[in-house]
Amino acid sequence: MKWSLPTTAALFLLSTPTLAASSSTNFSPRSDPGIYLAGDPNPEDGWTSLPDIDGARIDNSTIVASPGSGTLLHYIDSDYDPSKIKRAVIQIHGENRDAWNQWIYADLSAKRAASGGSFDRDQVVVMAPMFFNTADEGAYPFDPTLDAENAVTTTQDTAVTPTGRRHAVLHTGLPQRRMREKRGRHIIPLQKVSTTEVMIWKSVEWGDGQPAYEPANADGAGSFEALDAAVAFFLDREQFPHLRKVVVAGFSLGAQLTNRYATFRNDATEDSRIIFWISSPNSFVYLSGSRPRKIGRDCTNTYSEYKYGLNGTLPTYYTSGPEQLSTPMLISRYLSRTIFYLVGMKDDIAGLDSCSPNTQGLGHLDKMWYWTQQVIPMLPGSTGKEGVLPKNSLVRWVAGTGHQDWKIITSDPGVETLWLKQWYSDGTDARAPASNGVVGAKTPSRKSITNGAKDGMPSGTVWLALGLSGVAALAALL
């Protein structure tokens, strides 16, 4: 299986075998069914090739991010009839950029959902975009001559979230247990070496919506513009005449991107057809100055700068957009959108261990708890009741699950929120398949979450007052 690339991509000589990861009739994996080249789930030196996957094809021409001509490479169902499609899921990877695995997981989830009997697998489509970074030479075509001449480089720290425990799968198909390990540093070439139009970022800033580093003619387009193009592709009524919903779904760093995209997406005219699916992010972009945990001395003046808040330099996608919404208007638009949240009940892994994200919580579980139980309900225009989200939003707590994308996506709550909720045009749900045993859990108590009993979190009217004062202060900045 080959890319659709310009002729300069002839330098891309690497070949990989076709991997039949989701050809089994078992749609409920008991361990990670993902594919990890050479057995490494997040190689420090980046990916050097892209695997071919049964049932999916690699596309590097269809999704073009304006205003430039940069393309968003993605995996997508290899054979689908647009006239049959009623739902599309755009499944976004985390920091390790394994788009092929996201397609595998979402494909299994879709097959599970279809077994409920309300629809067939060929009525839905999965797209899994690839947000490359510069370390992925070989996975994207590059000029080795230019790369050899790239004497001037810069080192960027990419130590973000420790990798959760999972089973990697080698080309041999044999499982290999891996341990948590810290991210390292990698060299970012200052001379651009790509020979394709594919969008590439320096490191992890795609999760913030930032402009791509390559190609040179991206003209400032970034991950928000790329998502705009992907969403517009599916919302095209001439191309997909029967599509009801497109789900923008992200896990971990992909969830951070989805949260920020839901906050800043400029076009609201098709909001009734879009679901934002946010699972296990390390942080949210807060819409007020309040935080659930103590603000440390190291970030007293910076804790609310973007990407963690609305201060500082906001994405050019927003600042150069058609209109600048006030903070109250941003809040109102975010609350009006359909947003589903998920997190594993055992996901107490600490993400980026620094001052600003730590003000939101110390682990993925407690960050999600604060956001859904106290922050969103107490925003102006929301429900005003702790633990009660706006009617178009929901949260699912996934029992017995850690920071495991495959397990959440294929779980009962994952299938429900990706595929079943609002399946029909009248907003009713599709029938659920038989449970696979990975079920939803009750909302955890504040005392049961990580450090929840000793964080000094304000509540009730105190939180509401803090939120209103924070909104007033931030409104002046926009």
Image: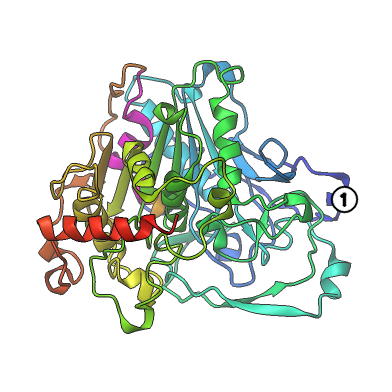
Q: Nearer the viewer, residue 284 or 330?
A: 330
Residue 416 on the magenta segment: yes
Q: Residue at x 60, y 60 (%)?
A: 37
Query: Would you say residue 24 is visible in this rendering?
Result: no
Q: Which quadrant: the C terminus? A: bottom left
Dot 1, how many residues are within 10 Å of its Cα: few (below 14), some (14-19), or many (20+)?
A: few
The spot of residue 33 in percent (x, y) is 46, 50
Q: Is residue 387 left or right of residue 47?
A: left
Magenta: main secondary structure equals helix
Q: Against 83, is 398 above or below?
A: below
Residue 44 on the magenta segment: no
Q: How is the image coloured?
A: rainbow
Q: Residue at x 69, y 62 (%)?
A: 48
Q: Against 100, is 77 above or below?
A: above
Q: Against 378, is 202 above or below?
A: below
Q: Is residue 55 left or right of residue 213?
A: left
Q: Which residue carries the number 1 mark? A: 8
Q: Nearer the viewer, residue 312 or 138?
A: 312
- Residue 476 lies in what quarter of the image? bottom left
Three-letter amino acid code at the position of disc 1:
Thr
The spot of residue 426 in percent (x, y) is 32, 16
Query: Would you say residue 56 is visible in this rendering?
Result: yes
**Residue that sits furthest to the front in the current view:** 476
The spot of residue 5 in percent (x, y) is 79, 43
Q: Nearer the viewer, residue 104 or 211?
A: 211
Q: Is residue 218 left or right of residue 78?
A: right
The residue stretch that appears in magenta? 407-424
Q: Which quadrant: the N terminus? A: top right
Say which element carries label 1. helix
The spot of residue 113 in percent (x, y) is 36, 30
Number of marks drawn: 1
Q: Nearer the viewer, residue 82 or 378?
A: 378
